[in-house]
Image (spheres, rainbow, N blue to C red):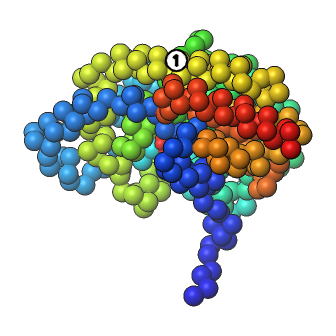
Amino acid sequence: MNYKFNSSVASLQPSAIREILKMTSKPGIISFSAGNPSADAFPSSEIADIASDILRSDPIAALQYSITEGYPPLIEYLKEYMKGKNALSEDDSVVVTSGAQQVMALASKALCDSGDTVVCEDPSFIGSLNSFRAHGGRLRGVDMQPDGMNMETLEDILKSDKRVKFIYTIPNFQNPTGITMSYEKRRRIYELACKYDVIILEDNPYGDIRFEGEDIPPIKSLDTEGRVIYAGSFSKVVSPGMRVGFGVANKELMAKMVVCKQVEDVHTNILSQMIIHRYVTEYDFAGHLSRIREIYRHKAGLMMELADKYLCPDITYNKVQGGLFIWATLPDDVDMTDFCLKLVKNSVAVVPGNAFSVEDNAPSQSFRMNYSTESDENITKGMEIIGETFKACRKL
Ligand SMILES: Cc1ncc(COP(=O)(O)O)c(C=O)c1O
């Protein structure tokens, strides 16, 4: 059978990350490729207690169909959470989604006609890029600077392209570069969105795992015109497998996104929502956050120390203050893809930088390393192997 796919999805390929993840299940591989939280960061026994209690005391509420907007007590909690960031206006509403990933799908479904432009940081999170593509979005990339998107490139695009529907940004500990957007740039991106009458989609799954430095207010906190859609998630702070995220946007826009969600999955898993609500309101969630920030501070610190020892100065990398990733860049005389393949052969998996490129097949000299999942011993061994593999590539 010759399947004739929808033209928006015909060119989509399985993400390179997933393909590399398949290899990471090979025994003995040291994986710096996933975006998973540390195995030590799950509040498993608390979740087991809550789940069992809910299923015994309130089974029907947890097993029955529920409303699309989300579990009302969790929505109330999220409203307070957003108010705490000064990022909820009277005209906003909150919807619980199946991960933050679904906010990208709902925003593009609600806003994009086929061929509309979505402006993205380049490189950016492949899951979101593919969601925009799958909903007919045409991507335009903006280069990254140490303090976030290049605002001049952004303005050039906004000036010349009349089909821009929204700008997608990950302002905190961006995936894959680890870059955090400065407050000045957050103000500027909002100004530009107002000037050119476009929406901003602010994706913030990593903001709560800052282990160094001061929090920077979200772009949503600057929003006086209902122009910012905010996406948040419990994936990195409680559990990705439970698939609970949330979106915050102006009521009119959110009502359309809710209809889109209704036809997609009816509602987010209600048992997961109830568990998360009980966990964040009745247990020591603040203590849990401090504990996981310590885990990541330690692991990131170790990886950066080893990068200084084994990779620098030839391979450069961005210092990070939170999130889960370090972005490293090879000198021009080493072929990045070849280097990543040799690394896998030497039992270390990283993600090649072009997996995150806005343009297919764009050249990249960078690769992404995750520090959250491997033991200290394996981080040490893996970084040493990266250094040795680099030296071997140089000798060839
Ligand atoms: C930037 C970014 N946005 C969204 C997601 C998806 O998160 P969720 O598990 O909440 O769908 C990820 C996951 O890695 C991510 O890195």
Q: Is residue 337 something that shows in the picture? A: yes
Q: Which residue is situated farthest in the left direction here?
A: 57
- Where's the N terminus, which quadrant? bottom right
The residue nearer to you, when weighing 278 against 366, is 366
Q: Which amino acid, mark 1?
A: His
| Label 1 Cα crowd, 10 Å radius (few <14 / some 14-19 / many 20+) | some
The residue nearer to you, when weighing 342 against 21, is 342
Q: Which residue is situated farthest in the top direction here?
A: 213
Q: Is residue 33 something that shows in the picture? A: no
In the drawing, does residue 164 fall left or right of residue 77?
A: right
In the drawing, does residue 147 fall left or right of residue 248?
A: right
Spot occupied by residue 393 in the image (x, y as percentages of width and height): 81, 41
Q: Residue at x 51, y 44 (%)?
A: 28
Mark 1 lies on residue: 298
Spot occupied by residue 169 in the image (x, y as percentages of width and height): 66, 36
Please tell me whether mark 1 sits on a helix, a strand or a loop.
Answer: helix
User: Does mark 1's beta carbon lie closer than 8 Å to ligand 1?
Assistant: no
Q: Residue at x 40, y 17 (%)?
A: 291
